[in-house]
Image (cartoon, grey):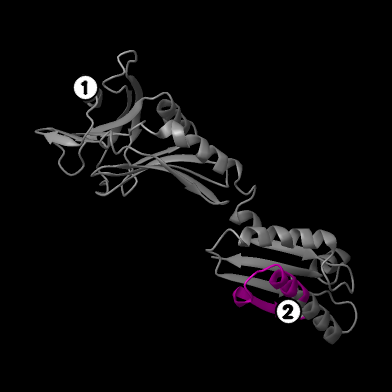
Amino acid sequence: MMRFFSMILLGFGLLSVSSSWAGLRLYSTPLSEADWQSQGTALICRLTHEIAGYGVAEFRQQNDGQLVFQVRVEQPATATAGEARLLSLPASWQHYDEGRDLGDLPVVPGETPFYLRESGARRVMAELEAGLFPTFVYQDWVEPQDVVRVRISALGFVAVVGEFRACVEGLLPYAFKDVRQTVLLYQTNQTRPSRQQRDQLDRVVHYLRQDEEVEQIRIEGYTDSLGLSRVNLVVANQRVDAVRAYLVEQGVDAGLIKTRAYEETEARFDNRTEEGRRKNRRVEIILSR
């Protein structure tokens, strides 16, 4: 049935404005208003296109390296929405090119019914760069007797896709999961971060400068059981305080930081073994969103 609808729609060509008639509804942005916008940070890059009266098409890549293409809609899809057909169609003036049938895809219930990762997203991007118009065709999830066609305009895409790729090149090479917990291991009686440990902290600082969603930074210090317990607690506190001071010196908001030093009886590992004591001479920096 969906293939039947798709082949019928191939014959209609591409309209420049949204319109409707009995049994068929078309959504597309007028050619004079078609536009793509690129924006981003060191954590995420976006390339967006508004579809008049329907929603927003978006390419998105975060610093986890995965490219996504999605369409957010004003009318969320229902759980019974079914499948859509994805076509790649030429504009009415592109007589030299023929449309391509890119196959079926599931309609995801909710506000992002069309969601493609990696290879699917790159295929849509390639079609747009070729000047073609990716078009979703499906039976309406609100009025199932109607067929809906949603056109993604290629106009203006080539002019800004380079900005998007430049943004992607500038993404941080690590994500929140990579800096959520940082562990510094210390030598006996060492209280200040070493050069290598400062490098670890600099990585956290660099990330914090980009991510405004981090709400708390916990710095927790632990100790081994060698020597007097009261001295060990003082050492644990000195380690925590030195890490806090370094982060604040690098511009981290002191109001986000919470600190605590633990006694040797609250150690992470077994203080009866050399390996356990080595691991217990530690400071943990934990980020929370």
Label 2: which secondary element: strand
Q: In the image, residue 64 lies at what x, y percent?
A: 57, 46
The vertical placement of 85 against 259, above or below, is above
In the image, 79 versus 143, the foreground residue is 143
Q: Quadrant of the N terminus?
A: top left
Q: Amino acid at mark 1?
A: Phe
**Up/down of 72 relative to 188, above or below:** above
Q: Which residue in the rendered view is the most extreme toward the bottom?
A: 230
Up the image or down, 278 lies above or below 92; here it is: below
In front of the other: 240 or 51: 51
Pointer 2: what residue?
261
What amino acid is labelled 2 in the image?
Answer: Ala
Q: Is residue 248 magenta?
A: yes
The quadrant holding residue 275 is bottom right
Residue 63 visible to the viewer: yes
The structure residue drawn at horizontal position 45% and vertical position 27%, both measured from the top left corner, is: 126
Residue range (magenta)? 242-263
Q: State which tag comes first along the sequence, 1 or 2.
A: 1
Mark pair 1, 2: CA separation: 69 Å
- Look at mark 1 in the image and give the residue it sits on: 4
Taking 232 as reference, is 101 left or right? left
